[in-house]
Amino acid sequence: MMAMPKEPAMTLEEIKRSADGLTNGERADLADYLIGTLEPLDSDHTDAWRKELVRRMDDIRSGRITGIPADDVLRRLREKYP
């Protein structure tokens, strides 16, 4: 049986350009997926981060702090790191 040629892989720049067209929620899902593909942290760090995230979400939900919209954060980052 003849092997089928592989499709060329997307470059990192192509992936970034494609990601720019995603909604905020889709980009968050992609970020979560990519983070999950990194080498796992030890359980102590994972538990500590989980507790910190729960605390921060509680602060946002209760109104103790106000979040910054993702579009504003991304715009600021792009201005700082063109």
Image (cartoon, rainbow, N blue to C red):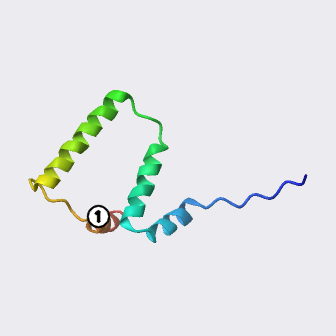
> Residue 50 in the image: x percent, y percent?
28, 39
Residue at image position (85%, 54%) is 3
At mark 1, the secondary structure is: helix
> Residue 48 in the image: x percent, y percent?
27, 34
When asked about the image quadrant of residue 9, the answer is: bottom right
Q: How many marks overall?
A: 1
Image position of 1 with respect to 47: above or below: below
Image position of 16 with respect to 61: above or below: below
When asked about the image quadrant of residue 75, the answer is: bottom left
> Residue 37 in the image: x percent, y percent?
49, 44
| Residue beneath disc 1 | 70
When asked about the image quadrant of residue 67, the answer is: bottom left
> Residue 55 in the image: x percent, y percent?
18, 43
Residue at image position (51%, 68%) is 18
Q: Give whichever of 73, 55 is nearer the camera.
A: 55
Q: Is residue 11 visible?
A: yes
76 sits to left or right of 7: left
**Alpha-carbon neighbours of circle 1 within 10 Å: few (<14), some, or many (≥20)?**
few
- Kindly identify the amino acid type of the residue bearing the numbered disc 1: Ala
Considering every residue shown, the one lying at the far bottom of the view is 21
44 sits to left or right of 55: right
Residue at image position (82%, 57%) is 4
